[in-house]
Image (tube, coloured by chain):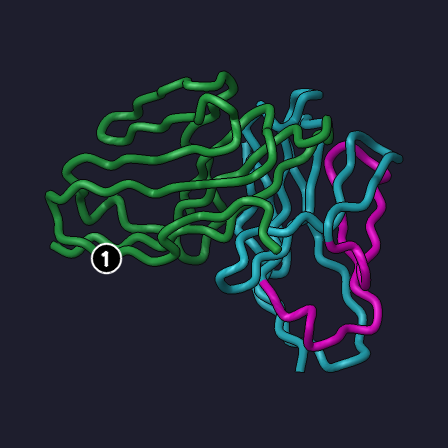
Amino acid sequence: NAGVTQTPKFRILKIGQSMTLQCAQDMNHNYMYWYRQDPGMGLKLIYYSVGAGITDKGEVPNGYNVSRSTTEDFPLRLELAAPSQTSVYFCASSYLALAFTDTQYFGPGTRLTVL
Amino acid sequence: TQLLEQSPQFLSIQEGENLTVYCNSSSVFSSLQWYRQEPGEGPVLLVTVVTGGEVKKLKRLTFQFGDARKDSSLHITAAQPGDTGLYLCAGGGIQGAQKLVFGQGTRLTINP
């Protein structure tokens, strides 16, 4: 199993550009998550999904959109990139319905810089 | 404001010393997880505690969940350079929500 994969690893965007961060998992997990990690701030939840076709907002959803058409994929869309979105983005997945008692498996992250 | 406060945020000690990292909140959690993160990688789960007062050991690492399920600690005995990394606590189930809230992390450096 590849686990959770993310592409790209690094990206530089100009202000106002858009992009999609890709995330895929091959563990047949129901739950998938997008986090951002800023220096000294831990991880903040952006969006999460409990299954294909079902998504919900986390703590910091503004400026982002998600969709989940399959169990395996959970892309994160940035529209009109802003310098405040400079961060490292992590995708994660877990299996159990009570997700907070289960193991979350994280991808390697995407480092995004908006200039 | 941070729902989960970790202390210290930075810690640099010599190999062989003992240390404790704290994770505190004014909120009650259903569970508390500890993750370790290496540079350039995603966090990896170390342990989950779910019962107030619960203690779990992972080799030289001892994790404790507070009796009131508002705080947790991570104690490392005889620290080794391989323990270097970012340690994150994460609380789950606050107000029944099925997601985790992370602390800001403790960056630990063990010097040979």
Q: Residue at x 72, y 81 (%)?
A: A14
Q: Residue at x 34, y 35 (%)?
A: B74
* Side (left or right) of B80 relative to A11: left
Q: Residue at x 44, y 41 (%)?
A: B23
Q: Nearer the viewer, residue B27 or A103?
A: B27
Q: Nearer the viewer, residue B74 or B52?
A: B52
Q: Nearer the viewer, residue B102 or A28?
A: B102
* Side (left or right) of B54 relative to B102: left
Residue at the extreme right of the image, as rendered: A53
Residue A94 location in percent, x, y?
63, 29
- Compared to residue A36, the image places residue B65 above or below, namely above
Residue A70 location in percent, x, y?
81, 35
* Side (left or right) of A90 relative to A53: left
Q: Based on the displayed image, in which of its 4 quarters is residue A85 positioned?
A: bottom right
Q: Based on the displayed image, in which of its 4 quarters is residue B26 positioned?
A: top right
Q: Confirm whether the magenta stretch covers residue B45.
A: no
Q: Confirm whether the magenta stretch covers residue A68.
A: yes
- Compared to residue B10, the image places residue B58 above or below, namely above
- Compared to residue A16, the image places residue B5 above or below, namely above
The cyan one among the chains is: A
Q: Which residues are magenta?
A: A60-87
Q: Where's the N terminus of chain A, which quadrant? A: top right
Secondary structure that dominates the magenta span: loop
Disc 1 is placed on an element classified as strand
Q: Residue at x 70, y 37 (%)?
A: A32
Residue B89 location in percent, x, y?
48, 40
The amino acid pointed to by label 1 is: Ser
- The residue labelled by disc 1 is B12
Residue B103 location in percent, x, y?
52, 47
- Compared to residue A28, the image places residue A16 above or below, namely below
Image hue for chain B: green
